[in-house]
Image (cartoon, rainbow, N blue to C red):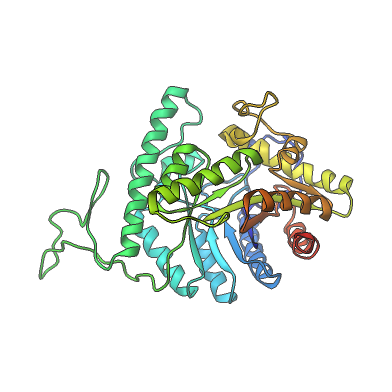
Amino acid sequence: MRHGVFFFGSVEMPDVLAGNPVPAARRRATREQVWHAHERLVGMGELAEELGYDSYWLAEHHFQHEGYEVVPNAMLLEAHLAARTSRIRLGSMFSIVPQWNPLRLAEDFSSLLNLSRGRAVLGVGRGTVSRELRSLTAHQADIGVMTSSEERKVIDAHNREVFAEYMDIVRTALSQETFSYNGKFFELPPPDNRDPDHEADTLTLVPGPLHPVEIWQAVTSPPTLDYAAEVGHGCVWWNQYHGYIREQWERYAELYEQRHGTRLAPGQNRILVLPVHIADTHEEAWRTGRIGHDEFWNLLAPFGWSSGYRGDDGNRAPAGLVPTLEQSTRQKCWAVGTPEEVAEIVQHHKDTLGLEQLVVFPHFPGHTYDMAAEQMRRFSEQVVPLLR
């Protein structure tokens, strides 16, 4: 089983207490704090390689003055990391596709892939935060968190349509020497596009990729699962009840075989992300882990992130659930405890899923980067040796 590391890219927040202040009202992160986080994230990538991790992932978000996710261009940092590392794979969880021009996304990723000599992987998602989606997308994709259920369905359908066309362009540009495209949102090249000596009727991505392209997508719903299997994206799951993940994990393999005629190995094309916090004793792990866990959910529960949890009645969790640490560990969404306790949860996922790729999330909001480095070391040196 291969192990990776994923960072949100938060500034250090020594004043974090669960729910105080309310995440959306948190004081603005200073420029110095934001840049300090960038510098530490480069160091975390170097440490991940030193400790033997297989992959290193950063989130892409914009305009987050609160300080929770402050890296707007993960590929730019990863290009820097590519020059400072030699082995580790580098990826984004996730590049928010509707916020990019799809041709620029293809160009930037192709450059990173070549600079890293084939170590870059492309992670893609549809977005979480309206302020960045509405500010950056050319076709007004949104997520509709603060809308009625009927409005949200319309907004979600439009987001999916934009995402699918943009990704169609990205895959086309990365896979074909020359290409043209005629869709709902883009005509490429644009009509009546003339160079001095001829009419341009095709485009060529420059630089084109010199290595195989690997694409991963966040999966939180059946339509996304179906789409990913259809186009051949690998799938990434996290923060969902372990039984729900197993159902989707197996369903993806069925759909993939139906679409492509290829039977996947039990863990092939699938990644599980698992937040981890390890200490010498159960009590210490829960004391320090709970603060970061609760701040995480106070930030993200309003965006619907806990919809993958199972409610007390055995059905899907109600909208807006703010999970407790007890719920998160009981549902095996988070692993907080001694090395033995964390290894037990990881082993469960390995056994039930045939897990081949696990990515740990070691830096909770409110924890320092020194704490994150300790967690990476503990997982590598104290948990991995316990796995069968």
Residue 307 visible in the current orientation: yes
Residue 292 at x, y = what percent? 74, 45
Q: Is residue 384 above or below residue 238?
A: below
Residue 206 at x, y = what percent? 32, 70
Left or right: 361 as drawn, with respect to 225: right
Image point (84%, 44%), residue name: 287
- The quarter of the image holding the N terminus is bottom right
Left or right: 60 as drawn, with respect to 366: left
Image point (78%, 47%), residue name: 336
Left or right: 196 as drawn, with respect to 16: left
Residue 131 at x, y = what percent? 48, 40
Image point (70%, 47%), residue name: 365
- The quarter of the image holding the C terminus is bottom right
Q: Is residue 286 above or below residue 1?
A: above
Q: Is residue 226 above or below residue 207?
A: above
Q: Nearer the viewer, residue 24 or 155?
A: 155
Residue 26 visible in the current orientation: no
Residue 85 lies in quadrant: bottom right
Q: Nearer the viewer, residue 263 or 55?
A: 263
Residue 302 lies in quadrant: top right
